[in-house]
Image (cartoon, helix red, strand yellow):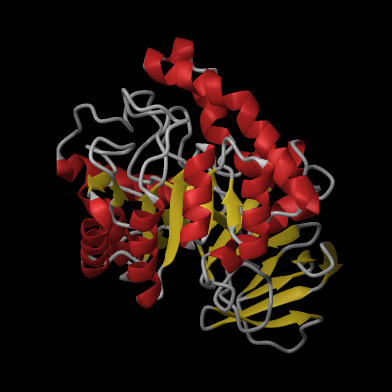
Amino acid sequence: MLLRGGAFFESETRTFVRGDVLCADGRIAALGDVEGAEAETIDCEGEYLIPGLIDCHVHVSSSGDPAELTPGPRLPLARRAWRTGEHARATLSGGVTTIRDLGAADRLNVALAAAVEAGEVEGPRVVAAGMGVTMSGGHGHGFIAREADGPDEVRKAVREEIREGATAIKLFASGGVLTPGVNPRSPAFTREELAAGVEEATKAFRTVAAHAQSTEGIKNAVAAGVSSIEHGVWLDEEAIAMMIERGTYLVPTLTAPYHIANGADAGIPAYAVEKGELVLEDHIASYEAALAAGVLVAMGTDQGTPLNRPGENAQEAVRMAEHGLSPGAALLAATGWAADLLDLAEETGRLRVGLAADIVRLSEDPLADIRCLTRREAIAGVVRGGAVTGDTGGTE
């Protein structure tokens, strides 16, 4: 397949370069002025081609309904599995070609990853954490995480998640917003418990994400060697310095508390709204401080939290730009930098010969207006692994 006549995003210079993109066997085969190729041709004149977006923090089995991602009642498994497939399609149609799912009841994320890989469901590439691992009564228990206490139990839990098919690991280093009776300012796993989980994951070549909102929880997780801090609500100077020293990424998920804090009239539980309001301002301040200091960042929405719906993932890149990143850097946070975090830099995240042909065709320039990523009418087509997805794009 030949995408002809557009301009493609060059990640190193953060600019668009006019040229064709040739895809063969699911990969990018050539960039630039491509002549003489016998290929299905798509006219991309006037379009801007970017790498498929990567969301490093989703719960794709959840729809974003106000009270869904909580310890409350759940739909039967069969209906949730069907909906998960629908959410995957919606995510892909929004330009997201890779996701890391950081916790799903019944490990529906692992099942989805297998279904997408087998071609049974059209969706993004899925890096699945199975169920997260949290302390007894900790954030996420009863819906997206299993409980473990002490280094040995954490170690065993990580081993079992890997056995069940997890390709990433999620540990809980602090309290959170959506679990009743849990304070987001409170640390959770001890440093020793976190270190045991990280050691087991690292032995199996899995990256480790730490849900970490409290200052002490963040420091414990960074010291334990996690790959990324998810949320990072209350960063202080020491925590930021630790992250820079160790190369720990921040996946800020600015979208999640924004919707929760502003969703009292949408049916979000009152306890969650109250905690969302507590974290919102400090969360933004911590993100801005981390950027100013040079902390590595990658995009993650926490999709599945209230009003945070599949297919609307690109709103996070907009918020990252509104609070400090240039449009080019925000685009990188949602593509190349995210691939670096997930150890997928040799597979996707950039438009480069040899990498997967994961491409979003835009009718507007995201460097001029990053918000175009969120406008469905601006998405002219999505290519995943060299194949046009859904009812997008045209041929000549």
Give the x, y percent position of residue 62.
35, 39
Residue 358 versus residue 251 in the image, above or below: below
Residue 360 sits in quarter: bottom right
Residue 19 versus residue 38 in the image, above or below: above
- The residue sitting at 79% across, 46% down in the picture is 292
Give the x, y percent position of residue 317.
66, 45
Residue 370 versus residue 181 in the image, above or below: below
Give the x, y percent position of residue 211.
44, 45
- The residue sitting at 29% across, 66% down in the picture is 114
- Residue 278 lies left or right of residue 67; in this view the side is right
- The residue sitting at 41% across, 53% down in the picture is 191
Q: Return the residue nearer the eye: 389 or 82.
A: 82
Position of the C terminus, as image quadrant, is bottom right
- Residue 105 lies left or right of residue 330; in this view the side is left
Is residue 84 visible in the rendered image? The answer is yes
- Residue 51 lies left or right of residue 276; in this view the side is right
